[in-house]
Amino acid sequence: MSDLAQVTRVTARGMITLRGDLASALMKKAVKALTGQAMPTSGQFLGNATSGVAWMSPDELLLVVPYGDVAKSVVQIDEIFKGQHYLAADVSDARAVFSVLGTNARDVLARVSPVDLHADSFCVGQFRRTRIAQVAAAFWMHDTGFDVVCFQSVGDYAQDLLTQAAKNATGT
């Protein structure tokens, strides 16, 4: 019997936490310059696996950039916000990222997360900060499944958890 979905640990995903006034013209300029995307709304991820932006909170975004571009992206943010109040932090190596792919990827995440993942409730481009089991995590949906992010310190546990949830167990 095959697994419900394929769980893969993603290596070298560039991520930058960007905090500040999300309504400001400078913030919109930075997001567009680094990701090519507009400003996301609450609960939204705009982009793809190598470049995008997620709304994390009323004053925080998660920028996804190519791993090799993180340092120069932070410098670019510093130049855009020079003299303004903001925070830009490279969190790439502090996060573990997983790809949960397949037609039953929703079922895998539904087994470990308290989020309504029914197709009428959660669709491509939606983003959620939540928990998978007892692990703080976030995930967004794309056309082939989900990307899941958690702290690197619990990455092995999260990988085991997601892999176990992907097992298509039949019980009595």
Image (tube, helix red, strand yellow):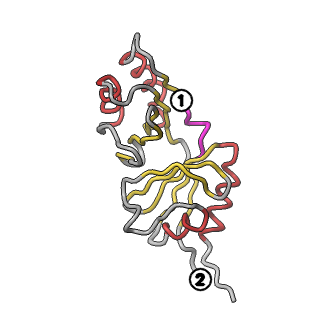
Q: Nearer the viewer, mark 2 or mark 1?
A: 1
Residue lying at 46% horizontally and 33% vertically, measured from the top left? 60
| Residue that lies at the very extreme toward the front in this rendered image | 58
Q: Which residue is mark 1?
A: 90
The image position of residue 93, as x and y in percent, is 60, 36
Name the quarter where the C terminus is drawn.
bottom right
Q: Earlier in the sequence, mark 2 or mark 1?
A: 2
Q: Position of residue 54 (x, y in %)?
A: 42, 42
Q: Secondary structure at mark 1?
A: strand
Residue kind at label 2, given as amino acid type: Met
**Which quadrant of the figure has residue 159?**
bottom right
Q: Is residue 127 above or below residue 81?
A: below
Which residue does the image show at 37% across and 68% down from the upper left? 120
Q: Position of residue 79 (x, y in %)?
A: 38, 15
Distance from Cα at disc 2 to Cα at disc 1: 41 Å
Q: Say what amino acid the circle numbered 1 marks.
A: Asp
Q: Quadrant of residue 69?
A: top left
Q: Secondary structure at mark 2?
A: loop
Q: Is residue 53 found inside the magenta-colored segment of the image?
A: no
Q: Which residue is at the far bottom?
A: 172
The part of the image, by quadrant, that contains residue 170 is bottom right
Q: Position of residue 95 (x, y in %)?
A: 59, 41
- 79, above or below 128, in the image: above
Q: Residues within 10 Å of mark 2 (few under 14, many from 20)?
A: few
The circle on residue 1 is 2
Total residue callouts? 2
Q: Which residues are magenta?
A: 91-96
